[in-house]
């Protein structure tokens, strides 16, 4: 977060630099192979929970669009994935690949 002054113009140039950086992050493309390596690492360390006696298996993921970035993960039972695991994956994607300040969507689909 950056504060600026509209009265004096303090930090106005820095605000423009931040806006350009967010624009670049918003238009970033992650290859499917890099995303799947990342998924394998994260799911191997913290797998999705079992819901109603069923294990959730994330098969693969891909970035389906940019501006804003949308990531689609394909798994066996997408309707059962809990919200906290969705937020966990979004947080891990941001930690690994950036997207600082840019809106991002993570969707789950049936394989």
Image: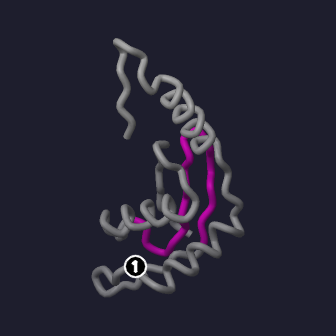
Q: Residues within 10 Å of mark 1 (few under 14, many from 20)?
A: many
92 left or right of 27 in image: left
Quadrant the N terminus occupies: top left
Q: Residue at x 63, y 72 (%)?
A: 36
User: For residue 60, what is the image quadrant?
Assistant: bottom right
Magenta highlight on residue 71: yes
User: For residue 22, what is the image quadrant?
Assistant: top right
As helix, strand or loop, the secondary structure at mark 1 comes to: loop
Q: Residue at x 68, y 68 (%)?
A: 34
As drawn, 59 above or below 29 = below
What is the x, y in percent for residue 38?
59, 73
Number of numbered callouts drawn: 1
Residue at which label 1 appears: 48
What is the x, y in percent for residue 8?
38, 14
What is the x, y in percent for residue 67?
58, 38
Please give the range of residues in magenta: 60-78
**Viewer-proximal residue among 92 and 108:** 92
Quadrant the C terminus occupies: bottom right
Magenta highlight on residue 21: no
Q: Residue at x 59, y 66 (%)?
A: 61
What is the x, y in percent for residue 18?
52, 35
Residue farthest to the top, as pictured: 7
**Viewer-proximal residue among 38 and 12:** 12
Please identify the dominant SS of the magenta region.
strand
As drawn, 36 above or below 14 = below
Q: Residue at x 36, y 15 (%)?
A: 6
**Viewer-proximal residue among 88 and 78:** 88
**Viewer-proximal residue among 51 and 32:** 32
Residue farthest to the left, as pictured: 52
């Amino acid at each position: 977060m950056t504060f600026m002054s509209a009265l004096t113009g303090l930090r106005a140039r820095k605000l423009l630099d931040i806006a350009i950086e967010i624009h670049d992050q918003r238009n970033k493309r992650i290859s499917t192979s890099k995303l799947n390596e990342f998924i394998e690492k994260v799911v191997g360390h913290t797998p999705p929970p079992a819901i109603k006696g069923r294990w959730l298996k994330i098969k693969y993921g891909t970035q389906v669009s940019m501006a804003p970035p949308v990531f689609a993960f394909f798994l066996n039972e997408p309707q059962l994935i809990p919200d906290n695991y969705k937020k966990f994956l979004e947080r891990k994607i941001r930690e690994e690949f950036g997207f600082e300040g840019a809106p991002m969507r993570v969707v789950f689909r049936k394989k």
